[in-house]
Structure formats: structure tokens, C-alpha cells
Image (cartoon, helix red, strand yellow):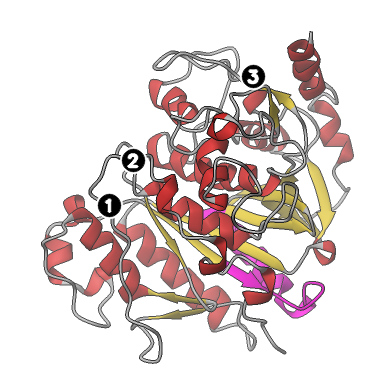
Amino acid sequence: MEAVLAKYENQINAFSEFLEDLPDVDEPVWILGARYDLKTKKSELLSDVRSRLWFTYRKKFSPIGGTGPSSDAGWGCMLRCGQMILAQALVCRHLGRDWRWDPEKRQPKEYHRILHCFLDKKDSCYSIHQMGIAVHRSAQMGVGEGKSVGEWYGPNTVAQVLKKLALFDDWNTLAVYVSMDNTVVIEDISKSLFLISHPNATVPASGQSCSETPHLQSQRPLDWRPLLLVIPLRMGINSINPVYIQAFKECFKMPQSCGVLGGKPNLAYYFIGFIDDELIYLDPHTTQQAVDTESGSAVDDQSYHCQRTPHRMKITSLDPSVALGFFCKSEEDFDSWCDLVQQELLKKRNLRMFELVEKHPSHWPPFVPPTKPEVQTTGAEFIESPDKLFESEEEFEILNV
């Protein structure tokens, strides 16, 4: 009965009501790099939003760590948002940005394999079990790290967890780079992608981007790994500073946009676009029954797509702590993103949200590319404790004006 109610809860507010709920403005809607005119592209817009993978609170899954909680309701919202931004990268990786979900049609096997990565069980590489244990480093939630269930996890904490867990994901071969101090370093990204693929290969010369490295160019199909680039920022002190709003909106226009982690204190949302001065987001705060599926079989996916009215909020209501996400499938894709950042975010803005530099800053500690430990493990026990992951919002660099 509960499963029926959960499915019904997801179906209420038919998608047609979303059309009436949108503001009557002439401005286009931007969803993860795609532009929609409400007057001519309404159905395409709805299909795009509905096709995003939607991860919410779940209940009645196997206890985390064997004796921990069997539901993440009330504490797992940022972890679920982390799952959504990573799932979007995987969809782009295997199915392409233009793929659309149709409940009446059979989905490709890659789609179901992506869903299996996020099922609520311990052997799924990005499950709530793996992510929860990774944050706490304990089978008992809230033990050992001074964090209690329900406490706010910053977007940077979740980004660091995804970076570590991705090392153990041999199927997707995804590299996750998380920037530091509001700075994206091309040299570090080049080293990460190159070394992960070829541990014994020569590292590109300091200051060279991927496109500037002859050896990388000659072996581009072999050396480039799909990249999820996450940029944690704090765009103000207690609220988002208005001077960054336009640049923030520009990020959703980029073809490489993978969404944004953020929300309000203790309420995490996955932002996928905007219209005028409002953000469009998927809300994980719906508790649904855990889906139990055998390994390798198709997943009952109805509850993994939001078919209710998407939520909106004023950009000015956003908590200043966010994490921008971008997916670059190829080296050309990354070079194109760098060009867009230079043109739209850096050259046009006196006050920058983040920096894009060629070389590793000399005053920083040496960059050490992440590597997979040579042991049999799920990966969760190798996640550093949160105090080493810059997880607290106080540890973000404040963007001053």
C-alpha cells in the first residue's frame, strides 16, 4: 500500500499544470544548456525536465552498515542531490544530452545500468549506503565524526565523496575534479585525466592544457576520460550577492552544464535551470519506497523521474554556498568550456565567481592526482574524514565585493 501511495504522490500535479504554473514572461527557459521558448517549445521543455533522474529520500532499504538507518528521510537530501548531478553526467556520458525518457518505450540497457549504480543497496557504487558511510566513515550514522543524522552537509563534502567513489567505478571511467579556493587549474585537470588513464605515462609539461600537449593530442581517444568538473563556491556571507547573479545564470546556458548543488540551510536542492529571476530545481524531499531489483535486470523506473510540477525559487533566496557542475565528454568539450568561461564569465565581469588558470599556483601544496588503492574494497573506507574535505560552509572562500 505504501508503494502505491508513493507512486501516487509522484503522479499528483499532472505535468500540464506545470505550464500554467510558469510565469508569463517573454524570457526563455534554460535547462542544463538547452534553451526553450515557452510559446513554441513547451512540450519539449516538459520532456527535458521529466527525463532528468530524480533521487529522493527512500525508506525500507537494507540498514546502512548492517545496523544503521534504513531510511535517509530527514538527513540525506544533499547526498541525493549529489546523486542527481552525477547521474546527469552519466546520462550525458552514455546516452547523450538529447536523450529523453518515455515511460511507454523500452529504455536502452545503458540507462538501466546507470540506475543500478544508484540503487539503495550496499553493492551499488553510488548508493546512499556508499555515500553515507563515506561521509561518516562509520556503519553507524553520526558516530565518529561528530555529525548527527539530519545535520547539513555542504555541497563540497558531497563533491569530494563523489570524487573518491568514482575511482572505484570501472564501468563509467569518469574523472571527478573538485576545484579549490574558487580556482580551476587546467594543469591539474590534465594531470588527473592523464595519470588515471596511464599511470606510467609522462605528465604534461607545467602550464600546458590538454589541447596544447602534443602527446595528448596524438592519443586523444585513449587518454581523455569523461570529466565531471565541480566548483564549490560561496557567493556571499548570509545570502547570495546580487553582483554574481548574472554570471550564475550564464552557467546554466553552457552546453556542458550539469546543474548546481545548493539550496537553503538544511534543505538541499538540485538546480537544473532558470527562467527570468527564478531557479528551477528538483526537490529530493519526498520519501518513497526503496526499489528492490535483481542485479542486471531492468529497474522499475517510474519513481526515478519527477512527473509533478517542478519547483521554483527566487535566485535571491538561494543560500550562498553552492557547487557548480559541468560535464565534458571530450577534450574538445573541455576546451570549449574554457573558452566560454573566458568569454562569458571572466572578460565580461569585474567581479568573478571563480578563476580559470593554466598553471598550478606556486603557493599551493603540490597537486597529487587521485588514485585507486590497490586493494579489494568498495571505496567508502578510503574517504577522508569531513574535517579534511573542507566540508563546512565556513571553509569556503568568501567572494568579496
User: Residue 250 colored magenta?
Assistant: yes
**Relative depth, front residue between 111 and 95:** 111
User: Residue 89 colored magenta?
Assistant: no
N-terminal label among 2 and 3:
3
At x 19%, y 50%, the residue is: 221
Q: Residues within 10 Å of mark 3 (few under 14, many from 20)?
A: few
Apparent side of residue 186 relative to residue 386 in the rendered image (left or right) = left
Quarter of the image that includes the C terminus = bottom right
- Where does the image place residue 52, in percent across and percent down from the top left? 60, 36
Q: Which mark is residue 373?
A: 1
At x 77%, y 56%, the residue is: 27
Amino acid, disc 1? Pro
**Relative depth, front residue between 243 and 151:** 151
Q: Residues within 10 Å of mark 2 (few under 14, many from 20)?
A: few
Quarter of the image that includes the N terminus = top right
Q: Which residue is mark 3?
A: 302
Q: Which mark is residue 4?
A: none
Amino acid, disc 3? Gln
At x 34%, y 44%, the residue is: 168
Q: Residues within 10 Å of mark 1 (few under 14, many from 20)?
A: few
Placement of 115 over or under 353, stated as above or below? above
**Is label 1 in contact with label 2 (beta carbons under 8 Å)?**
yes
The local secondary structure at tag 3 comes to helix
| Magenta extent | 232-258
